[in-house]
Every structure is written in structure tokens, then in C-alpha cells.
Amino acid sequence: MSIDDYLAGLAGPLREIGEKLTPVIADALPGATGAMWHGHPVWSLGGRPGQRPVCLVKGYGSYVTFGLWRGQEIVDRSGRLVPAARAMAVVKLHGVADIDPALFTDWLRAAAALEEA
């Protein structure tokens, strides 16, 4: 399964979120590899899926989770990132209006810098 296949399998509003979010990720992480890993899309800086992961996108019943692997280490002045397992932080997206491309790009670049350090 590809990322496009994954997004196509999401319900309408969730698919729209994924379709708006994935170009933001691609633009912010030009050197990253996006692939399916553990059943959902993950963008990593390493040569294979899950090697030095930066972010993930995962659809649930009524929202899409956008997660940053080391998100708890990122300074988030917006207060939108919620701590999750290990060092991860996430934001739940209920509609395309929840996507802030400039803010998400800042988060992604900060997360990538942590992996590159």
C-alpha cells in the first residue's frame, strides 16, 4: 500500500485533511522519504521507512493525527502540540481549517533538525 492508497481509503473529510497535509510535509522536508510504516504514512530522513522518523499521519474515525516523533522537544508557542508516547507530540485535525501550513512547516523543520543533529 502506498501513501496515496492510504489517503484514498480515508472517509471524505479525513481524506481532504490528508491531501492538504501531505504537500505541506513534502515541501517542509524535501530530503525525507515518505512511506507506509506500521500501517500509516511516516516521513523519515533515513534510507528506509522508519529510519530516523520525523512525522506521521494517521486517520481515525473523526480526525487525523499529525504526529512528530520528537515533538516534545520542539518549542511550540501555539500550544497545539499535545504530548504523546515517548518523546512524540501530536495534533488532532478535525478539518482542513485545522492545518496551519506555516506553523506545521516550522514544526517539521525543527523536528528534522533534531534528527539531523
Image (cartoon, grey):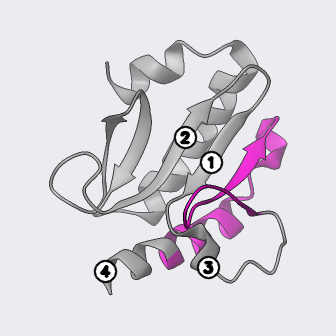
Q: Which mark identifies residue 116?
A: 4
Looking at the picture, how far across and down is residue 57, in whole percent?
55, 40
Q: Quadrant of the N terminus?
A: top left
The answer to whether 109 appears left or right of 44 in the picture is right
Of pointers 3 and 2, the one earlier in the residue sequence: 2
Picture layout, residue 22 above or below residue 68: above
> Which amino acid does the dot numbered 3 rest on?
Ile
**Residue farthest along the front direction in this orientation:** 86
Sequence order check, earlier mark of 1 and 4: 1
Identified by mark 4, the residue type is Glu
Secondary element under disc 2, as helix, strand or loop, is strand
Mark 2: give few (<14), some (14-19) or many (20+) Cα within 10 Å. Answer: many
Quadrant location, the C terminus:
bottom left
| Element class at badge 4 | helix
Task: Work out how far the residue at label 3 is from the one at label 4, CA to CA, in angstroms.
Answer: 14 Å
The residue to which callout 2 is attached is 57
Residue 66: mark in rendering: 1
Left or right of residue 112, residue 19 in this image: right
Look at label 1 and name its amino acid. Answer: Phe
Badge 3 is on which residue? 74
First to last magenta residue range: 81-110
